[in-house]
Amino acid sequence: MGSTQIVESALQSREVQLPRWYAIHTRARHEKKVAAELVRKGITTFLPLVTEVHKWSDRNSKVQVPLFSCYAFVNLESSAEARVSVLRVPGVLSFVGDNHGGGVIPDHEIENIQILLARDVPFAAHSFLEIGQRVRVRGGALDGVEGILTRFDGKKRLVLSVETIQRSLSISVEGYEVEPVGPVKKAS
């Protein structure tokens, strides 16, 4: 076997592991501490935060709270070392998914939430859906965002889901053009 063949064989046998998104389950009210520690360790972390007005007897105050209580997202290689590094952070309970190994979250699901928050689009929490027509918004501030088209109180809404943690957000798409990108999911 020539030296070129040896190098090619070694390259083919080495599995390239690109970082992927995973959800982690945290202790209640530990999301920000966990995210800060993960960032300190050099782990790419996404903790979506929203601003809420909290009322006390003497004042109102704007507070940033996690969009998904008890969850954060990490982007890392699928190696045992990377997972153990995350699991050793105080406040992290487990990876979300089968056998606590963590299910990979498609990049577009994380990107959809990042777009929603960056563009300050109004939304409401929505129960997780598994049925309905998958659509993509065409034009406007939500161009390219995909989700499940639903109807609530006679108005069109788009449900964006993070399937791994079974959480969804619902936004109004009245006035937006949407196009189908997949078949209607069948209820099982």
Image (tube, grey):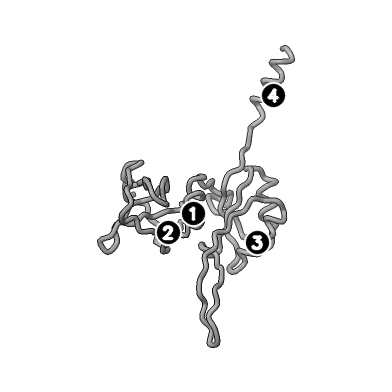
Helix, strand or loop under label 3: helix
- Residue named by callout 1: 113
**Amino acid type, mark 4:** Ala
Q: CA distance from mark 3 to mark 1?
A: 20 Å
Residue located farthest toward the front when viewing the structure as drawn: 140
Q: CA distance from mark 1 to mark 4?
A: 39 Å
Residue 123 percent across, percent down from the top left:
42, 62
| Viewer-proximal residue among 4 and 65 | 65
Q: Residue at x 69, y 62 (%)?
A: 90
**Amino acid type, mark 1:** Ile
Q: Residue at x 52, y 47 (%)?
A: 105
Residue 65 percent across, percent down from the top left:
55, 67
* Nearer the camera: disc 4 or disc 2: 2
Q: Is residue 172 left or right of residue 18?
A: left
- Residue named by callout 4: 10
* Nearer the camera: disc 4 or disc 3: 3
- Disc 1 vs disc 2: Cβ atoms closer than 8 Å? yes
Is any atom of residue 138 visible in this view? Answer: yes
Q: CA distance from mark 1 to mark 2?
A: 9 Å
**Amino acid type, mark 2:** Leu
The image quarter containing residue 59 is bottom right
Is any atom of residue 24 visible in this view? Answer: no
- Residue named by callout 2: 169
How many C-alpha atoms fall within 10 Å of the one at disc 1: few (<14), some, or many (≥20)? some
Residue 3 percent across, percent down from the top left:
74, 15
Q: Earlier in the sequence, mark 1 or mark 2?
A: 1
Q: CA distance from mark 3 to mark 2?
A: 23 Å
Label ID, residue 34: 3
